[in-house]
Amino acid sequence: MHEQTARKEDPVGVNVHTDGGVAMALLLEAGAVLSSSLDPSTTMGQVAELTVPRLADLCVIDLLDRDGSIRDVAVAASRPGLAESLETLRFEHPLDPASEHPVAQVIRSGEPMLLEQMSNALLTSFAQGSKHARFMIAHGYRSAIVAPLVARGRTLGALSALRLGESPPYESSDLGLACELAHRAALAIDNARLYSDLKRVQLAESFMSEASRVLASSLDYGETLQRVARLAVPIVASWCAVDVLNENGDIERVAIHHPDPEMVALAERLNRDYSLSRDDPTGAPEVIRTGEARIYTDIPPDALADYARDNEHLRLLAAIGATAVIIVPMIGADRITGAITLISSGQGRRLSAEDLPLAERLARRAGTAVENARLYTERSRIAHTLQQALLPASLPALPGAQVRARYRAAGELNEVGGDFYDVFEAGGEAWMLVIGDVCGKGPRAAGATALARHTLRAAALSGQSPTRMLNMLHRALQTQPADADLCTVCLVRFQRSEETAHLRVALAGHPPPLLIDKDGESRQLGKPGTLLGVLDPIEVHEVSEEIGPGQTLLLYTDGVPEARHGDELLGEDGLRRLCHPAPKLSLDGLLDHIERGALAHAGGSLRDDLALLALRLDKTTE
Amino acid sequence: MTPLPFEGVGAEEHLRIEVRTTPDRVVLELHGELDLLGAPLLQKQIDETDVDARGILVLDLQGLQFIDSAGLRVILAAHESARQRGQEFALTRGGNQVQRLLSVAGVDERLRIIASPDDVLV
């Protein structure tokens, strides 16, 4: 960019004789400005300011958008208020790229234009409507130079320098300086665009990989959206708000983020006093209704005033200071779940149409995450409730003995497990300890689990023996509509005697309970019997045992010996090893030890549910 | 979102089933693990195979390393439907864990167990 002297193809060289000092100063200042920033809109504003009043009374820089429209990115004027009026006018009457307006002509041809004297008739001939014509005549448009912004052989836009009223008209000798300035501005814009394209790609990649990681790591619906909002600020936008459709179909703001807490407070006030309604014609409600993204890259003061409901609303909106807004729909599995609003403000990176794909990717990812989180929350709530209903809320106090239980559902599969346990009075000063496993998970297993518990309780109340109880459950399972519901059960009838207690053990396809001795060694009780619900008839055996002071009875489900990491099962031997410290541990301590041991053996993630039920006689007997 | 218990391993790799038909029997050879994840695969295979094309259905468990109650349920269901069709049903012994589970479940003495899938049923 060392092109201080006129280039060969320039139609006219810089006129150093007439305006040498001004031209040189202007080009030097422009050089400084253009190399100082990579944000094109800021830069163009500064270039326009530089030309006024030395080169022009009014300077407009127009850029050709990627969609082919012409947009004024910078306006500077010597007369107060003129720049603002012109911006409003241009917003209402955008330049038609196919029209005879000098800016449109120059952008099409890539050649500069000098309009030494503009008559009212000429102004009217290219005006974009009568209001535009009256505007130009009223402000005394007199003389103009329109120079193309050309970089790498492409015309990016045009710089228009105008002299108004009684100012001296432009001469051909002024053309060189304007063209040079335009050329430098074009290079700066081109560089900035290349840079921002590169940054955008890099940003999009790193942002999306981070977004995916964050979104995948949380299954909490509210937290997920808070994270989305925090993630987007300030990398992508100055503000990020997330609105969702709640169960009632109303729009609910679930997250808003800005680096400044005071600004967040302001936005929260805005949301509280002027909350979105699902029928609002524009903004997030419109996007949620239509599923179409909206982008506003130009927000003139008038548009804000039209949108505001009252003066206070306008004040708050103005304080947000939006320079551009992108609103994208969040789409879940089969429906629109909400919208993400990105806002750039102040001096922050300005959002443009090129950010839309990134915003849409983010919204899609967030939409899926929200849907998953919602399903997960709902499922775990139901599963938790159901599981609680299937297990006793508390265990009864047994005469002269303590009983403790543990239950742990498998890993991340937040479904209702099929393991169950129960302790209840069986009449005749006898108590029944039950542990069992219904095959499978989910609602069907939950139904069979409830059936098992209630059938066994009912059978015990009518004074049935363990064998009869198991047969009753077997019949009940067989009458279930679902084929081949199988269930394994270990029943222990407990009856206190003088110093010891009498146990009667019956197994139906269930692992045998352990009796842990005072020295920590253990042995299996009972004799294998047929599992329930499938093979007919079942064959079960009752085996009598005694338990004395210092001994521990342990009932468990398959999840314990089958805790595994890779191919290595904890196994019966592993479980017995975990029982070794029993004599030194309280009953709770022992169950904690076994649970932790099984979990550790499984590498922290159990594949099957795990249930434990333990009994120990009180040290002092009455 | 819910991770499978076995990351990166598909159910197909987890349980492999080979179907073989001889003049007198259909043999399903099971390799790997027959659990919550593998059980539906075996059920699907049984549904899709013409298992009653011969008088005997054999589940060959010699290559089976692990079984849980979900797997056992599919085997017992196959046993029951074979019985209803009047077809003979037999198993070969699986790995240690498989044998233990069948024994604990009290089904090993109720099912016909043969040493090799092509043994004559007595």
Image (cartoon, coloured by chain):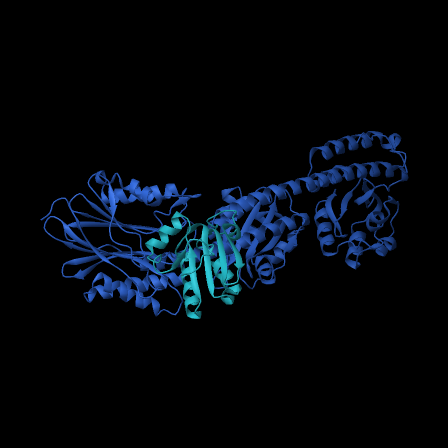
- In the rendered image, residue A107, in percent from the top left (x then y), is placed at 82, 48
Q: Is residue A411 above or below residue A8?
A: below
Kindly tell me whether residue A216 is visible in this rendering. yes
Q: Which quadrant of the structure image shows residue A308? A: bottom right
Q: For chain A, give the colour.
A: blue
Q: Residue A173 or B63: which is nearer the viewer?
A: B63
Q: Residue at x 34, y 41 (%)?
A: A597
Q: Residue B103 or B14: which is nearer the viewer?
A: B103
Q: Is residue A58 above or below residue B36?
A: above
- In the rendered image, residue A106, in percent from the top left (x then y), is placed at 84, 47
Q: Residue A466 or A149: which is nearer the viewer?
A: A466
Q: Residue B75 or A519: which is nearer the viewer?
A: B75
- In the rendered image, residue A59, in percent from the top left (x then y), is placed at 77, 43
**In the displayed structure, does residue A181 sit left or right of residue A325?**
right
In the rendered image, what is the letter of the chain coloured cyan?
Answer: B
- In the rendered image, residue A588, in percent from the top left (x then y), is placed at 25, 44
Q: Residue at x 53, y 48 (%)?
A: A228
Counting every numbered tag in the picture gives 0
Kindly tell me whether residue B74 is visible in this rendering. no
On-image quarter of the N terminus of chain A: top right
Q: Residue at x 72, y 33 (%)?
A: A35
**In the displayed structure, does residue A434 sit left or right of residue A362?**
left
